[in-house]
Amino acid sequence: MDVHLAIDSAVLLLYFVLIISIGLYMGRKEEDLKDFALGGRRIPWWAVLASLIAAETSAGTFFGTPGEGFTHRNYTYLQLAIGTIIARILVSYIFIKPYYDYKVYSIYEYLTARFGVATKNAASAVFMITRLLASGARLYFAAIALALAYEMISGAKPDQMQTLWIYIGSTIAIVILTAIYTTLGGIKAVIWTDLIQASIMIGSAFIALGLLYSAIPGGWNEIVARHGSFHFSDFITTGFDPAKHGWQKILGMFGIEYTIFAGLFGSTFITMGTHGTDQDMVQRMLTAPDIRRSRRSVILSGLADIPIAFTFISIGILLWVYYQAHPDPTLPKTPNETFCHFILYQMPVGLRGLLIAGIFATAMGSLSTAINALATSFTRDWYEPYINPNATSKQSLHAVRRATVGFSFLMIAVASATSYCVIVRPSLRIIPIALGIFGYTYGSLLGVFLCGIFTKRRGNNFGNIVAMIIGFVVVAILSGLPNGIAGIFGGKLYTQPAWLPLMEFPWWICFGTIVTFSVAILFRTSREHRPPL
């Protein structure tokens, strides 16, 4: 065991040395904020493509998507990938050109030109709070590997307090390692390390799928015998309840997470929000030399989502079959941890180290861009206008690096809180957590951006802020958030009407966007912010 552990540790150490070295080398000679935030707009489109894939495929995907396959034992989650492709085409032709035309570093600067400073500040604040919570929560997922590794090495399952400290220690290590090259190298370091991390992540997933399939006695015949034949309903579902009629039949569809309609509409709005109005994603797109190459990377990243998601869901389904054929009394109760359990106990030595490196690759890839985007948005939207309006290029560069360090500490705090929640409630599933956080606020962001892009005379600072608040409140009610919070304290604020079912997370951004846009267009744009007809 000691020799095996040494080999796996050596593989993991080599990965960390490689990533940090490449990050520091590629990000050298940062001269100003433009270099730090946009890489001088000199990044090849294929590197931007890899960076987008790395950012989207977090440790939540690495564990959460197999967890969905293990739990549901079907491919209905793949329906959401349909909307991601549709949305990326829309994003590439609706959002990217205005961002290039206005030469923005932070995309919320566009809102200053279109509506005014107040709308920009509101949108930037919503982004920073939401991205901090979402990315911090995802950090917990990577720590799963070390918590289970501790159990394997020590031979004893850690108690809740020990598990919490393992998660916190893992989080601190991941953040420090990522912050080193992100702080010094900026977006260039982020993108080039993302390229390596995406390759490791995808390669390790394919290796895991092949080894898992070969470990099932009887192969495909055993899979069918255990699972049953795969049918159309294992891939496509409508969510319609045959026992209901009329509007109740349609409304019931919104209470199911994975349906074809959630894929066509709900997922389209989710991806438009995350890829059109989130500085984290858009900042990568703006590093390409021109609009055409930026569009290419965005659309191709959507097409790549389908085989990647299919691979991870297949891993989850095969895990279920494997553990049906090989019952394991030590199998974790939480589906999120099943894949990691298999990696640690069943993977060959060396490959196990590579798979664990793949886990950290997904975590570091999504984390590096998150803290880079947060630091860029803070510097451009808050430091330069308010803290130091006369900042020189060097001062702004120092400020963005300090902000990177600051947001790294905040990420650790959020990840620690998430770890505590999941330890206390092990039944929590990763994908709804990771996507649900965006759902409450990104509809408000997307609605305001669409008002600015699609209208010339509608929307103003006051109306936009009112619209964003109303959009958030509507989503909170549709999702049952107030009762969820009250339930923590043993209470209940109101009774949900029978005609209004609780909506699942794929629909939250959709309805938040529709409500925000509908309210925003009721207000007229002030004369000084009207774009030319």
Image (tube, helix red, strand yellow):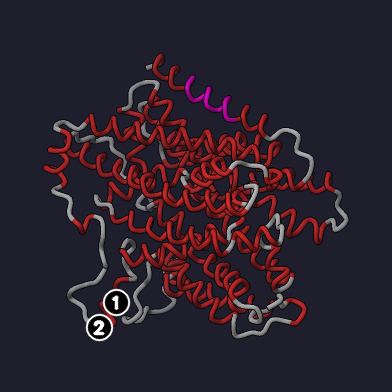
- The three-letter amino acid code for the residue at tag 2 is Gly
Q: Residues within 10 Å of mark 2 (few under 14, many from 20)?
A: few
Residue 478 screen position, x and y as percent: 42, 74
Residue 333 screen position, x and y as percent: 30, 44
Q: In the displayed structure, does residue 499 sit left or right of residue 361?
A: left
Q: Is residue 154 visible?
A: no
In this rendering, the answer to whether 164 lies above or below 465 is: above
Residue at image coords 42%, 20%: 5
Secondary structure found at label 1: helix
Residue at image coords 75%, 38%: 30
Query: What predominant SS class does the magenta segment belong to?
Result: helix
User: What whole-number distance in Å separates the C-alpha atoms at marks 2 and 1?
Assistant: 7 Å
Residue 463 screen position, x and y as percent: 64, 80
In this rendering, the answer to whether 179 lies above or below 123 is: above
| Residue situated in front as seen by the camera: 193 or 255 | 193
Q: Is residue 520 visible?
A: yes
Residue 409 screen position, x and y as percent: 64, 45
**Which residue lies under the disc numbered 2?**
246
- The three-letter amino acid code for the residue at tag 1 is Ile
Was residue 52 drawn as part of the magenta stretch in this picture? no
Magenta part of the chain? 10-19
**Which residue lies under the disc numbered 1?**
250
Q: Would you say the residues marked 2 and 1 are in contact, meaning their CB atoms lie under 8 Å apart?
A: yes
| Residue situated in front as seen by the camera: 425 or 453 | 453
Displayed quadrant of residue 264: bottom left
